Image (cartoon, grey):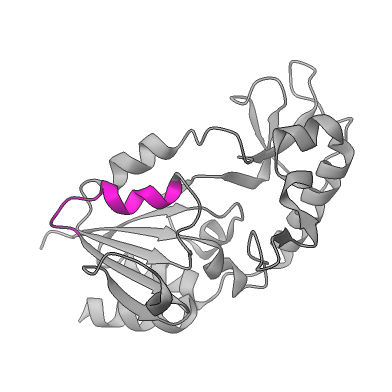
Amino acid sequence: MIKKKIVVFTGAGISAESGLQTFRGSDGLWEGHRVEDVATPEAWQRDPESVQRFYNMRRIACRRAQPNAGHLALVELEKYADVYIITQNIDDLHERAGSKNILHLHGEIMKAQSSRDSNLVYQLQKDELSMEDKCKMGSILRPHVVWFGEAVPNMLIASEIVKDADILLVVGTSLQVYPAANLLYETSKDCKIELIDPNAHQMRINSNVILHSGTASEILPKWVEIYAE
């Protein structure tokens, strides 16, 4: 039996269940900080030490967090389908859960990159980056995170992954961050799209999308169980 290709597009909601705050709360702040102060190239130019400290704290929080039932259900799903995960999240919870095919759109917090050449990327063995940490060219290492105002280099790869999917599962995202939200429109006309989110039925979305109101840890294990039957 040929396995179907299932692409899972995950957002902050699935990580929130593991205790990691969503990228931007209802008050427009991320962990009490204005996004403009911690997640833009201008913030880095203006006050790189503050930006480093902010991401050092996020990295520590990420290390303490554990994959939840939603992450683990996606690992289980690999027994029954060819699963590809495209995530907006910068944490490594999908990796630690055991998923295999993962594409990060907005970078990975457990990595650092050269502030001169973004192609120079390093896996971090510690939680904290300092201004003394340099790349092989001698430039300061910055968080390997796509900031507002920067290009999303993996979008073209994501579009290629999505275009021949049999099923697109959208999990824990408000679909308010672009260009990532455009992935729904990169699918083929035969692709079945399902959205899992506590606010699913409040979203303005195409009528052909199947909605599941609930968290990833509530819905995904049941979804996988039904799919496997």
The answer, for residue 52, to whether it is visible in the render is yes
Q: Is residue 31 magenta?
A: no
Q: Is residue 173 left or right of residue 3?
A: right
Depth check: give the residue in front, 202 or 22. Answer: 202
Q: Where does residue 188 sit, x and y in percent of width and height?
A: 18, 50
Residue 158 sits in quarter = top left
**Label tally:** 0
Give above or below for 227 relative to 4. Answer: below
The answer, for residue 220, to whether it is visible in the render is no
Residue at horizontal 57 percent and vertical 69 percent from the top:
67
Q: Where does residue 197 sit, x and y in percent of width and height?
A: 44, 74
Residue at horizontal 81 percent and vertical 56 percent from the top:
57
Q: Is residue 182 magenta?
A: yes
**Residue interval drawn in magenta:** 180-191
Q: Is residue 210 left or right of residue 52?
A: left
Residue at horizontal 40 percent and vertical 71 percent from the top:
203
Q: Is residue 217 left or right of residue 156?
A: right
Give above or below for 89 relative to 120. Answer: below
Quadrant that contains the N terminus: bottom left
Q: Where does residue 105 sit, x and y in percent of width and height?
A: 50, 45
Depth check: give the residue in front, 85 or 194. Answer: 194
Furthest residue in direction top, as rendered: 137
Q: Where does residue 6 sit, x and y in percent of width and height?
A: 27, 59
Quadrant that contains the C terminus: bottom left
Residue at horizontal 28 percent and vertical 50 percent from the top:
185
